[in-house]
Image (cartoon, rainbow, N blue to C red):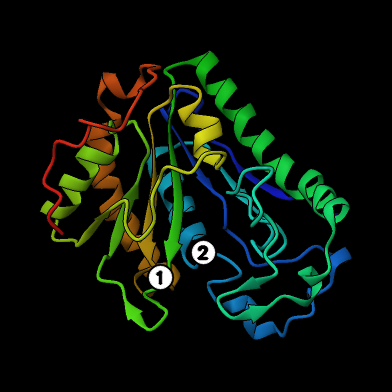
Amino acid sequence: MDQPVEIISGALDAGVLFICDHAANAVPAELGDLGLPAAQFERHIAWDIGAADLTRTLAATFGAPAVLSRYSRLVIDINRGADDPTLVMRISDGALIPGNAAIDDAGIARRRELYWRPYRDAVAARIDEMVARGPAPAIVSLHSFTPVWKSVARPWQIAALWDKDPRIAAPMIEALRADGFTVGDNEPYDGALEGDTLYDLATARGLAHVLIEARQDLVATRPEAEAFAGHLARALAPVLARADTHIIRHYGSRAGLRRWDRTP
């Protein structure tokens, strides 16, 4: 079996770790094609289109480590909590996944140990190494979203998802809006998802973090993703340079934390 995690080396004192939960659309040999035609694996249901190129470009820009998944979210959704009922999807955006349709608890547990756990452990190990070296790293998770969902066009070009800690999301949203982008603040998804990758590995540890969502039609090719990553890097660099970004800090309620303009 191929390793389920791709690890990109970088300076342990870079102050940032980039991660990509849905980087790939591959399926382990033991699972075949999950009963799906090849065309389904090119769709957003199988991976976050462009997210891997964003991750690799940003890691290179900042000389920072990165951790990426190597298997499709149709095998198991790395970003879900261990007990989430959508950990292994049986239907995704209208597509029945035959290889998942009859999976039982034992089958889910096997996939969790083979493909979900190694990714979570790899991210945790790299965080431990970076915290030990110092400064405490910010965690930036790269995702992408389909431009149309259920026949409704999504206006956002990029989004910042966050839960309680605004240290990266707030100034990044401001910078990207100043750069001319239509930016979603916890749109089209909400960043407060207990058990997800950032909740377990960043929120619970008090590490500054953000989940960045790019619209897929803007990052579908490598050149597009690399250009888009340039805008992200310019927005992130001043935030990562702040001493406060590297302080371990635990936040309580979201209430009162959002102090910036929320106008789209």
- Residue wearing tag 2: 48
Where in the figure is residue 40, as x and y percent of width and height? Answer: 63, 81
121 sits to left or right of 190: right
Three-letter residue code for mark 1: Gln
Crowding at mark 1 (Cα within 10 Å: few <14, some 14-19, many 20+): many
Where in the figure is residue 106, as x and y percent of width and height? Answer: 88, 51
Residue at image location 23% in from the left, 57% down from the top: 183
Q: Quadrant of the N terminus?
A: bottom right
User: Of helix, strand and loop, which one carries label 2?
Assistant: loop
Disc number for residue 87: none
Asked whether 248 or 235 is in front, the reply is 248
Asked whether 102 or 181 is in front, the reply is 102
Where in the figure is residue 173, as x and y percent of width and height? Answer: 21, 47
Q: Quadrant of the C terminus?
A: bottom left
Where in the figure is residue 237, as x and y percent of width and height? Answer: 27, 37
Residue at image location 31% in from the left, 62% down from the top: 227
Q: Are marks 2 and 1 in contact (CB under 8 Å)?
A: yes
* Figure quadrant of residue 177: bottom left
Residue at image location 42% in from the left, 72% down from the top: 146
Residue at image location 46% in from the left, 29% down from the top: 203
Three-letter residue code for mark 2: Asp
Residue 24 versus residue 20 in the image, above or below: below
- Label 2 to label 1: alpha-carbon separation: 8 Å
Residue 60 versus residue 203 in the image, above or below: below
- Residue wearing tag 1: 216
